[in-house]
Amino acid sequence: MGLEEYKGVFIYAQQVDNKLSNIAFELLGKAKDLAADLDEKKVTAVLIGSNVGSLVDELAAYGADRVIVVDDPELKDYRTEPYTHALASVINEYKPEIMLVGATAIGRDLGPRTSARVKTGLTADCTLLEIGDFPLTPIPGQEQKHKQLLMTRPAFGGNTIATIACPDNRPQMATVRPGVMQKIAPIAGAKAEVINYNPGFTPNNCYVEILDIVKEVSNIADIADAKILVSGGRGVGSKENFKLLEDLAEALGGTVSCSRAVVDSGWMPKEMQVGQTGKTVRPKVYFAIGISGAIQHVAGMEESDFIIAINKDENAPIFDVADYGIVGDLNKIVPLLTDKIKAEKAKKTA
Amino acid sequence: MKIVVCIKQVPDTAGGVKFKPDGTLDRQAMLAIMNPDDKAGLEAALRIKDADPENVKVTVLTMGLPKADAVLREALAMGADDALLITDRVLGGADTWATSSTIAGALKNMEYDLIITGRQAIDGDTAQVGPQIAEHLGIPTISYAREIKVDGSTVTVKRMFDDGYMMLKANMPCLITALSELNEPRYMTPGGIFDAFDKEVTVWGRAQLDVEDSNIGLNGSPTKIAKASDKVAKGKGTVVTPDSPQEAADGIAAKLAEKNII
């Protein structure tokens, strides 16, 4: 395979029910950064679905220079086989140098199946992507390749970090953790070049039948979008006691979130969980209240701008990542803090 | 009906992580357990067998170092019928592409109606090997299974998504990746443990696999590790032990004011 034939950064523009997922915009933001360091600057979004043409302008606004649309009735709802066929066919036809897919419940199925079909490597759940040399430093007797995609990801539940390259196969493929990359501010009126491409869809043994689709939509605010998160752990003590955190969050205009232990105890729903098996968040302020700071939790919140921890155990590992840590009793401190904030805000508006 | 469950021996992440000089994991130096998602997959297979013990046979398969024999014996003690260990020096250092090619290379020489893998292993957390095995075998995959029901020659699965779930029906043979939330795996029985150590674990090396040399081991892996290291914690901030709760609240409020939050 002639590696030099593969050009440009492509992203998989995930849509569900003809609505683009946030990850599509995040990937476009990252793709623009990466393309700036490559010879081919054009960023291409691959949009797969049924009657999805109207989503093209939104992708353009978030940075897509070109959109390849694969539109077919077989693609109405996500199914592994027809979507893999669509994405793999686009890759074989348009030959991207880099192909980014969101590490969502869809992307973590579509990505591996597609990478196996186009015979290339795939790095999972990346949290950092950059262009650089492989090997990182020259090794005698081994060619050092330049302008390679260097993909960094946590492994072992966040205990280790590995940087991975795919020097001899194209495209260089990665799935990317939602909530980690930054989308750009949308450019009103931006237009993208549109290519309609349909490789043909003939159901085969790999097509599965959808018997039912159930949406478990909650009215809960998405913690990944919150600017201020008031997060509680096992130390909060009970479901009822989360009222203290809710009051604080309300005073601050923030949202309540929690650790895995809280979800496991049934105090809060899974949607509110921060961490390796929950959501990755990066608010301006993150309160870790009664959270010990297991590595799996820290992996989901350590990128927050400012971390405030309250814990009665001075040896809690959360204090290793906190910018400001208070050793003390949350039951006494949190209500006083809520009162203080309310008073300060009242003073300002007076 | 023949069910093959792919399981992996993984280092218990609580036990600390070690690397070899070439940047690959030094698995030999770490404690080992059966990967939780895989164990749920095995339990799901055993429940299908419980419902029809005469006609369902459960085989467990793993690829790894010779010491991975231990998780196969655990699976036998839980109730699996037989076990296959794929081990060979030339298979070492494999990424998900090479691993899935290797395991598919073994499955091509086996009989199966249903293959169950865990969604992901707690060491790599990639969730890639299951779907990639299915692709190499040309059979359907259903990932993220929360319920599995076999009915004649089809299987119905509750497939979880970020915003809900789908009920999907696939023709067998097919591959399903199991979530650990699928069930509560059974314990090994004392009799099972006793029998498991008398049973023979089949061992296959490179020669028994239907796979090309260019797709196995470190050399057959498209992805290469540029750098691997233990995570470095970010710089420690200030930790204070205030004399009173009021002082603590005032201290936090002052920080929030400094950051223009209030």
Image (cartoon, coloured by chain):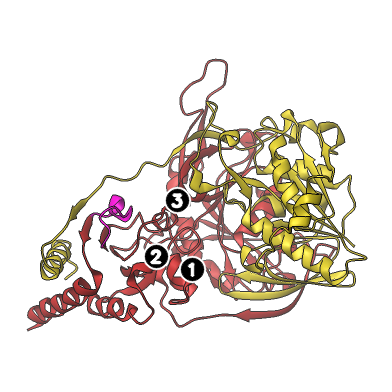
Chain colours: A red, B yellow
Dot 1: what SS?
helix
Magenta residues (range)? A312-323
Distance (Cα) linking label 1 and label 2: 8 Å
> Please, which chain is the residue tagged with disc 1 on?
A
Judge whether residue B110 is colored magenta.
no
Q: Is residue B260 above or below residue A39?
A: below
Q: Which residue is mark 2?
A: A186
Tags 3 and 1 touching, CB below 8 Å:
no
Number of numbered discs: 3
Q: Which mark is residue A58?
A: 1
Q: Amino acid at mark 2?
A: Pro
Distance (Cα) linking label 2 and label 3: 13 Å
Dominant secondary-structure state across the stretch colored magenta = loop
* Direction from residue B179 to residue A269 in the image, left or right: left
Q: Residue furthest top?
A: A140
Q: Quadrant of the N terminus of chain A?
A: top right
Tags 1 and 2 touching, CB below 8 Å:
yes
Marks 1 and 2 share the same chain: yes
Q: Amino acid at mark 3?
A: Lys
Dot 3: what SS?
helix
* Direction from residue B10 to residue A289 in the image, left or right: left
Q: Earlier in the sequence, mark 1 or mark 2?
A: 1
Viewer-proximal residue among A237 and A108 = A237
Q: Which residue is mark 3?
A: A32
Q: Earlier in the sequence, mark 2 or mark 3?
A: 3
